[in-house]
Structure formats: C-alpha cells, structure tokens
Image (tube, helix red, strand yellow):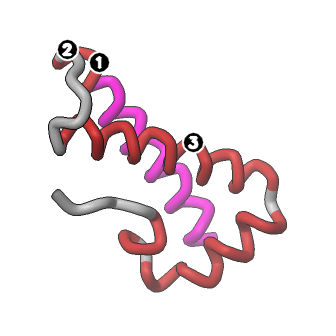
Amino acid sequence: MERHDLPHDFPEFAEKIQTLKEADPHFNELFEEYSKVESEVYRINTGEENHIDEYVHELKAKLLHLKDEIYSILRK
C-alpha cells in the first residue's frame, strides 16, 4: 500500500509546500489535517485499523476535499 503524502503527490510543488507550511498558518493547518487523515486512511487500508464502510467513505471524501483545497492554494 502506497502513502499519499503531499510532497509525493505534488513533487513539482515540494518547495512551495515547505515554504507555505512555514509562512501561512492556514496552509499549515490544512497540511496537518491532511497528514492526519491520510495516516488514518493508510492504517485502515493496510488493515491496522478497522472501521465501518460509511466512516471510511467519509474519511476518503474529507481527504479529497483537503487535497483539492491544498492544490488550489499551490496553483496560485
């Protein structure tokens, strides 16, 4: 199972991600939340944790929403 951390998914924005994490509190909050949710989804997908399908679906939807919002900021 592969991880989906932001620098891996957006290698072209690796430097900008680091800069924004340090300079933009809102971006850093989004980044931290994304990392937290991504870690939980990873643990579920690898079988380390078990949850009902509805919860997993909600987590994945939240992950996509956060990723979209972050990508929008990165493209500016």
Residue at x 62%, y 61% (from the top left corner):
73
Residue at x 55%, y 56% (from the top left corner):
70
Q: Quadrant of the C terminus?
A: bottom right
Residue at label 1? Answer: 55
Label 2 environment density (alpha carbons within 10 Å; few <14, some 14–19, many ≥20): few
Label 3 environment density (alpha carbons within 10 Å; few <14, some 14–19, many ≥20): some
Give the SS element for disc 3: helix
Q: Earlier in the sequence, mark 3 or mark 1?
A: 3
When asked about the image quadrant of residue 20, the answer is bottom right
Q: Amino acid at mark 3?
A: Glu
Cα distance in 3D space between marks 2 and 3? 21 Å
70 over 37 or under it: above or below: below
58 over 75 or under it: above or below: above
Cα distance in 3D space between marks 3 and 1? 17 Å
Q: Quadrant of the N terminus?
A: bottom left
Compared across the picture, whether 76 is left or right of 24 comes to: left
- Contact? badges 3 and 1 (CB < 8 Å): no
Q: Which residues are magenta?
A: 57-76
Q: Amino acid at mark 2?
A: Ile
The residue closer to the viewer here, 47 or 63, is: 47
Residue at x 46%, y 65% (from the top left corner):
6
Residue at label 3? Answer: 33
Residue 31, position as x, y percentages in the image? 60, 53
Residue at label 2? Answer: 52
Give the SS element for disc 2: loop
Residue 66 inside the magenta-drawn segment: yes
Residue 19, position as x, y percentages in the image? 73, 76
